[in-house]
Structure formats: C-alpha cells, structure tokens
Image: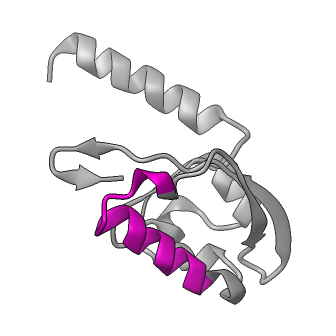
Amino acid sequence: MPQQLMASEERFQSVVQTATDAIVLWDEQGNILFWNKGAQSMFGYTAEEIVGQALIRIMPTRYHQAHYYGMERLGIEGDDQALVKTIELHGLRNNGEEFPIEMSPSKSDHDDETV
C-alpha cells in the first residue's frame, strides 16, 4: 500500500474513532461492518461484540419491518430516494434500554459492494 494512502487511512481512522457521534457502517444484508468508539459509548457494545452482527440488534423490534423494507428498496431496487437526510427514532442499548437517536443514512458503492 503506498505510503500516502496509508497516511490517509490513519487520518481517517483517527477522526472516526475519536468522534463522539456513533458511526456505524453496514452492508446490503444489514450486517454491521464498522463500529466506532462513539457507537460503543452510545450503545454499550464493543466493536468485537457487534461487528458482523445484524443491524437490527441495536433497534427496537417495532423498527425491524421498516428496516427490512428500506433495505430492500435501497438494495434490490437501487432506490436512492429511500435515503432521507435525518431520521429520528430510537436505538437499543446492550442493556435493553431504548434511547432517542438521529440517524443520517448514506449509501456508498465501492468494489461491487454497497455500504
């Protein structure tokens, strides 16, 4: 890996890991790919505990159906209109406690993978 690219990756990791906001990346199947320290603080799971798990693990049950519908629209139909600027809903902590969150979803296509 070129030195300039490595330096860029290190800067990105530093910024993302020190952010107080939760930053969570997931794939087209709804599996968590990345979890920063802000997400750990907010939801109570370490990256080791949650990466690879289904995103619905941090959502109250009442949101599961809407989540699956949105993932289907976004993934299968490629409907970027399914993305909204900010969604106000609730997250689910490791201890089962619900708390209000704001989510700003985005979509990235890279190397034939959608995140």
Q: Is 42 or 59 nearer to us in this picture?
A: 59
The residue lying toward the viewer, choosing from 6 and 23, is 23
- Left or right: where 31 falls relative to 37: left
What secondary structure is the magenta-colored segment mainly?
helix
Q: Is residue 69 left or right of residue 20?
A: left
Q: What kind of colouring is applied to the model shown?
A: one colour
Residue 27 visible: yes
Name the residue at 71% across, 43% down. 21
Q: In which quarter of the view is residue 88 placed? A: bottom right
Q: Percent position (x, y) of residue 26?
A: 43, 60
Residue drawn at point x = 35 percent, y = 26 percent: 9
Is residue 1 covered in magenta? no
Q: Which quadrant would the N terminus be assigned to in this image?
A: top left
Q: Is residue 97 above or below residue 5?
A: below
Q: Judge by depth and name the residue closer to the eye, 88 or 38.
A: 88
Query: What range of the chain is rendered magenta?
Result: 64-81
Q: Is residue 52 visible?
A: no
Give residue 7's quadrant in the image. Answer: top left
Residue at 71% from the left image edge and 65% from the top image edge: 43
Rendered location of residue 40, percent (x, y): 66, 57
Question: Residue at left 54%, top 75%?
Answer: 67
